[in-house]
Amino acid sequence: MKKVAIIGSGIVGICTAVELINRGFSVTVIDPNQPGSQTSYGNAGVLTDSSLMIINNPQLLRSLLSLIFKRKTSFRYSKLFVFSRLSWVINFLMFSKKKHMELAAKALRELQVLSLKTHKKLIKNTKSNNNIEAPGWMKVFKTKLSYEKYAYELDILDKNKARYILLNTAEIKKQFPDLQIEYYKGVLFENSLRVKSPIELSKNYFKYFIKFGGSFYKEICKDIKFVNGHWTVVLNKNKKIFDEVVICAGPWSKDFLTNLGYKIPLAWERGYHHHFSTKNDIDISPAIHDVDGGFVYSCNKNEIRVTSGVELNFREADLNEKQINEVVQKLKTILPLKNKLTKDPWLGSRPTIADSLPMIGKAPKHKNLWFNFGHNHIGLSTSAGSGVVIADMIENKQTSINIDPFLPDRFIL
Ligand SMILES: Cc1cc2nc3c(=O)[nH]c(=O)nc-3n(C[C@H](O)[C@H](O)[C@H](O)COP(=O)(O)OP(=O)(O)OC[C@H]3O[C@@H](n4cnc5c(N)ncnc54)[C@H](O)[C@@H]3O)c2cc1C
């Protein structure tokens, strides 16, 4: 039986581990932290097959000046970080082309359709149904102008046969009477799900992995070395030997691949969340993406989680509460928020490759080494599908979807 090590137990590592254990491999997950406790902990819980628009789309260049010079709740940046990662930033902007957007949308649609199907099976097998609501995701627009700007994304969705329902002001009001303001338009994604507690989902999937024979070393992987046809994984005090290694370390993936001579075009987009209680009972089941404000809010009974947009900053830089605090001020006009339930905001770093597509596949310079990271804003949605294709590739089988746009060797690493 082939021995596989998975480095990183975020939702991507967990789903990869579950898929491999289901196919009969001997699988060990290595992580100094509890499974699902890092970036995968604090997301907005959207599980969709229709998140096709990448950030570096052709519209980005048009709004670049306003992003740089105007204060926005959706986007903040540290000048020092941008200068220190200038080549990544330029590379990222260079991908803002129509041709790349179309390629990315098609590839992401295939991956997300596979992923949603796989998540549904896992949800059933792990008895996680009570953690799921449907439909799970809606985008809302405050003004006619902001909705008109969305025409490009609707066109992308239509071309890729994504399913959604358009709601007008009255329909939004009728379906969600707890909202205190009027939205001009809503786009409800029919196939989407919402995970009420992403950490509980990770824990359930991980329990399933352990139940079916998986192992977990709660240790940091310090290095990996290819010696005599096998991979040596260097832990704190000892070393372990494996046939195959899959790197699923999210925003940390680049750190130890540099030792192996890879130049991975990976940075991160930080994001925050806060939790609030509400003044009265609230019932809104999809996560709502307020497009004008650039934030997402979701509701579990009378508890609201609100997640912020993007902050480009050093991964380990201090919390900067300004952005999420401004989001909270906006949310107070939308919902009757009462008390803050989290003292400090939670902070996570979305791992982002320069072309906004995850890196899934064989490491270009090494045998039996696999990459599965860079899932940026949609890692909960894409995780299960990425596990399936990694397992297909390790088994040397035809992959279930076209994997070319995700292969690491699309870059010269
Ligand atoms: C505010 C916010 C909202 C989001 N909302 C959504 C959403 O609604 N839907 C969606 O699909 N996605 C969403 N995302 C994105 C999603 O959360 C991420 O894409 C996803 O969690 C990435 O998972 P991961 O497993 O790659 O990374 P992580 O969860 O960060 O896991 C990486 C793991 O690697 C481990 N690791 C690091 N270094 C080492 C080492 N040396 N040795 C061993 N282990 C190591 C870490 O401890 C960590 O556990 C959101 C993200 C944010 C920040």
Image (cartoon, helix red, strand yellow):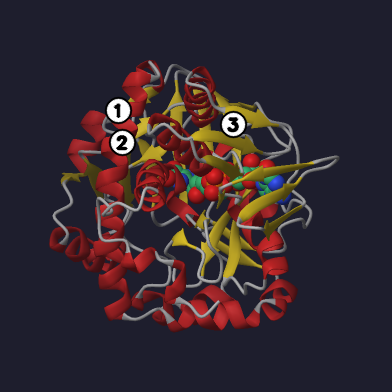
Q: Is residue 363 above or below residue 70?
A: above
Residue 328: percent from left, percent from top: 57, 43
Residue at the spot x=28%, y=29% of the render?
134
Q: Earlier in the sequence, mark 3 or mark 1?
A: 1
Q: Amino acid at mark 3?
A: His
Left or right? Give the position of 355 relative to 81.
Answer: left
Q: Going from the N terminus, do you reach mark 2 or mark 3 first?
A: 2
Lateral position of residue 251 relative to residue 95, left or right: right
Q: Which residue is mark 1?
A: 121
Left/right of residue 384 with respect to residue 330 in the rendered view: left
**Mark 2 crowdedness (10 Å alpha carbons): few <14, some 14-19, many ≥20:** many
Of residues 333 and 115, the one nearer the viewer is 115
**Does mark 1's beta carbon lie closer than 8 Å to ligand 1?**
no
Q: Is residue 294 visible?
A: no
Hey, which quadrant is residue 122 in on the image? top left
Residue 118: numbered disc: 2
Residue type (three-letter) at the residue carrying disc 2: Thr
State which quarter of the image contains the C terminus. bottom right
Are dots 1 and 2 in contact, CB under 8 Å? yes
Mark 1 vs mark 2, CA separation in Å: 5 Å
Q: Is residue 309 above or below residue 285?
A: below
Quadrant in the rendering for residue 4: top right
User: Dot 1, crowdedness within 10 Å: few (<14), some or many (≥20)?
Assistant: few
